[in-house]
Amino acid sequence: MRIDVLTIFPDYLAPLGLSLIGKAREQGLVELAVHDLRGWTTDRHRTVDDTPYGGGPGMVMRPEPWGQALDAVAAMGAPERPRLVLPTPAGRPFTQAVAHEYAALPWLVFGCGRYEGIDARVAEEARERYDVDEVSLGDYVLNGGEVAVLVVVEAVARLLPGVIGNAQSLDDESHAAGLLEAPAYTKPALWRGHRVPDVLLSGDHARIARWKRDEALRRTRSVRPDLVAALPPGDLDRRDREV
Ligand code: ADE
């Protein structure tokens, strides 16, 4: 997969050289480039923002540098048509399903907005050469898209074949089956008076699987009843409904 990131704070993306993503890059599973948007400004002060039409507080990112930058990046991988991901609190929710959708694509380009956002014509005009997707991490406001890009890239890259050693862990984890994951334990079996649930020491794999399912359901019902309500009919067996 190829990933390009456009930002006015390239240093903010430094963690993409570390850990799992860093290794995926070394192995050639992910090809990632971070570009400084100011490289596509033409004035002496390398200005990327201006006051909003219609008034209001804050500044809006100017369309010209974005247009130039998006032209240049699209040309780097032509004729492939990239997905342009614009993180914004006004976007569609970024979920595990969207992460899977992105993981199946050959090329993602991220545009990091700052201030009060990017001039709305940028996303509109980019549709001529990109599939454009505005996504939100959640119902809160960040100072810019950089942190959101770190989140989205991590969620996507770990789904790529070969990035995670044990593919089984992808199947079991939270959200894989629409439920949160059961709690996890390791040695010692007794720690500060707190005991690991006996069933996990039993060696009875069927009982352990049932326990994990029950705990996942209990936890999800308690903190995310919306997820249980959204399960496809038939996903809950009779035993599930008794938990
Ligand atoms: N940029 C600012 N806030 C954001 C959010 N909640 N999600 C994605 N990008 C953002």
Image (cartoon, grey):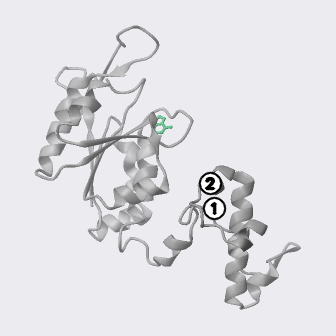
Upstream in the sequence, badge 2 or badge 1? 1
Residue at 39% across, 27% down: 117
Residue at 69% across, 74% down: 212
Say which quarter of the image contains residue 16. bottom left
- The front one of 40 and 117 is 117
- Is disc 1 surrounded by few (<14), some (14 to 19) or many (20+) residues within 10 Å? many
Q: Is residue 73 visible?
A: yes
In the picture, the disc for residue 37 is: none
- Residue type at mark 2 is Leu
Q: Which residue in the structure is indicated by mark 2?
A: 227
- Asked if marks 2 and 1 touch (Cβ < 8 Å), the reply is yes
Q: Is residue 154 visible?
A: no
Q: Which residue in the structure is indicated by mark 1?
A: 180
Q: Is residue 181 rendered to the left or right of residue 71?
A: right
- The front one of 44 and 130 is 130
Q: Is residue 8 rendered to the left or right of residue 125?
A: right
Q: Position of residue 124 (x, y in %)?
A: 26, 30
Quarter placement of the N terminus: bottom left
| 82 to 48, vertically: above or below | below
